[in-house]
Image (cartoon, helix red, strand yellow):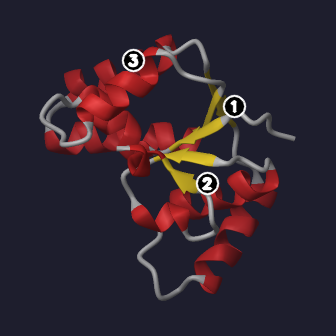
Amino acid sequence: MATRTEAYVDTSALIALADRSDTYHPLFRRLFSEPPKLITTALVIAEGHGWFLKRFDSTRGLQFLAMTEAMAPLRVLSVGASQQRAGAELLRRFSDQRLTLTDAVGLHLMKEREVECCWSTDFHLGLTGVRLAIHQL
């Protein structure tokens, strides 16, 4: 079970933290400066690495990985077959949304762990009622 201070970190929050030109950079810089317990998935890390690799180069991709590895309060959860199946079920349930499997697995984990806050700029990660950090502005 999650504690009241645990937050789920989505790819968009990590990108906003790493990319100073991102609109949400100031918010996530502040949030990450004194974070609660944070969880994310290996899928989120892979998605963020790919984002920097595609938009910039391998150096920026490796810098992103180094940043996430250095985040002491960030716990990266593995994604197994059961989480992937649960994510696929959510993709079918919310087929009218443009969710990725990474998003759907995140939604599943937030429900399973009773996470109350999601650090994301993607509004669809609030589909199941989890509060988004961007609403703290």
- The 10 Å Cα crowd at callout 3, few under 14, some 14 to 19, many 20 or more, is few
- The 10 Å Cα crowd at callout 2, few under 14, some 14 to 19, many 20 or more, is many
Quarter placement of the C terminus: top left
Tell me if 30 is positioned left or right of 128 in this view. Answer: left
Does residue 100 appear anywhere in the picture?
A: no
Lower position in the chain sequence, tag 3 or tag 1: 1
Q: Residue at x 55, y 47 (%)?
A: 118
User: Quadrant of the rendered structure where residue 33 is?
Assistant: top left
Which three-letter amino acid code belongs to the residue tagged 3? Met
Q: Residue at x 74, y 67 (%)?
A: 86
Q: Position of residue 22 (x, y in %)?
A: 18, 39
Question: Quick one: SS at disc 2?
Answer: helix
Q: Position of residue 119 (x, y in %)?
A: 48, 43
So how many labels did they put on this image? Answer: 3
Write down the residue under mark 2: 106
- In the depicted structure, whether residue 49 falls above or below residue 82: above
Question: Quick one: SS at disc 3?
Answer: helix
Write down the residue under mark 1: 5
Quarter placement of the N terminus: top right
Which three-letter amino acid code belongs to the residue tagged 1? Thr
Q: Nearer the viewer, residue 118 or 11?
A: 118
